[in-house]
Image: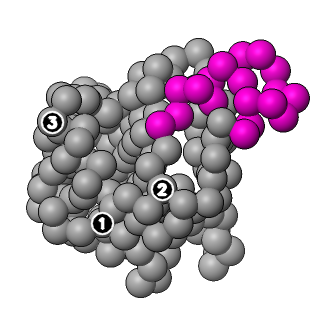
Amino acid sequence: FSPKNVLEIGTYIGRSTLAINFGGLCSIERFWTCDGTFDCMNFNDLKTTGFSEEKTESVGKIEYYGKTMSTELLKKSMDINTKFDFIFVDGRLSGDDCSILPKVMSDSCIILLDDFEGVEKGVINVMMLRNVLKGFLLIEPPIEKDFKLGNLALLVPPNLITLARQQSLPVNM
């Protein structure tokens, strides 16, 4: 998986932004991120913090929109025909967001959702998206004997998943 265009909804302090961006050093060409409440990150300041040359260059690919609601950023990306390959949702989606998202997603776009537990925003976001992203496979965080191993979920488009019918079993049943 090598996304070129990435969108993050819910930047806050930018820790996830940097983690995703640095993880995609070889493929990410453009990284859009917004936060409707906060404007507390200046990614340009990070260009002088002693990162490797490669990481410093990748910080320049981040387009940060502080105090910008996700609907506004999604409309902007739709206006210039940007298609995202990877979307990280760490904020609350609105009904308008849910109707715009399919229009700005590439055919192989994977969505990662934070806080997928209980009645947290990740679960609510999936419930809102289920009618507009029909057929997407939801991969929930693993739980092992009531011990939670994470709270991230994935929505994967059906064209990336191939199920094959088993022709014969090695044993008689």
Q: Secondary structure at mark 3?
A: helix
* Residue at figure coordinates x 37%, y 69% from the top left: 92
Please provide the residue range marked out in magenta: 45-63
Residue type at the position of mark 2: Gly
Q: Which residue in the protein does label 2 denote? A: 66
CA neighbours of label 3 inside 10 A, class few (<14), some (14 to 19), many (20+): few
Q: Nearer the viewer, mark 1 or mark 2?
A: 2
Count of numbered labels shown in the rendering: 3
Relative to 159, is 33 above or below? below
Q: CA distance from mark 3 to mark 1?
A: 19 Å
Q: Secondary structure at mark 1?
A: loop
* Residue at figure coordinates x 74%, y 37% from the top left: 46
Q: CA distance from mark 2 to mark 3?
A: 19 Å
Residue type at the position of mark 3: Asp
Q: Is residue 113 magenta?
A: no
Image side of residue 144 versus residue 88, left or right = right
Examine the rendering and report whether any part of residue 118 can be seen. Answer: yes
Quadrant hosting residue 7? top left
Residue type at the position of mark 1: Leu
Quadrant hosting residue 67? bottom left
Q: Which residue in the protein does label 1 denote? A: 93
- Which mark sits nearer the N-terminus, 1 or 2? 2
Q: Position of residue 20 (x, y in %)?
A: 59, 38
CA neighbours of label 2 inside 10 A, class few (<14), some (14 to 19), many (20+): some
CA neighbours of label 1 inside 10 A, class few (<14), some (14 to 19), many (20+): many
Q: Nearer the viewer, mark 3 or mark 1?
A: 3
Q: CA distance from mark 1 to mark 2?
A: 16 Å
Judge by depth and name the residue closer to the eye, 82 or 173: 82
Q: Secondary structure at mark 2?
A: strand
Q: Which residue in the protein does label 3 denote? A: 79
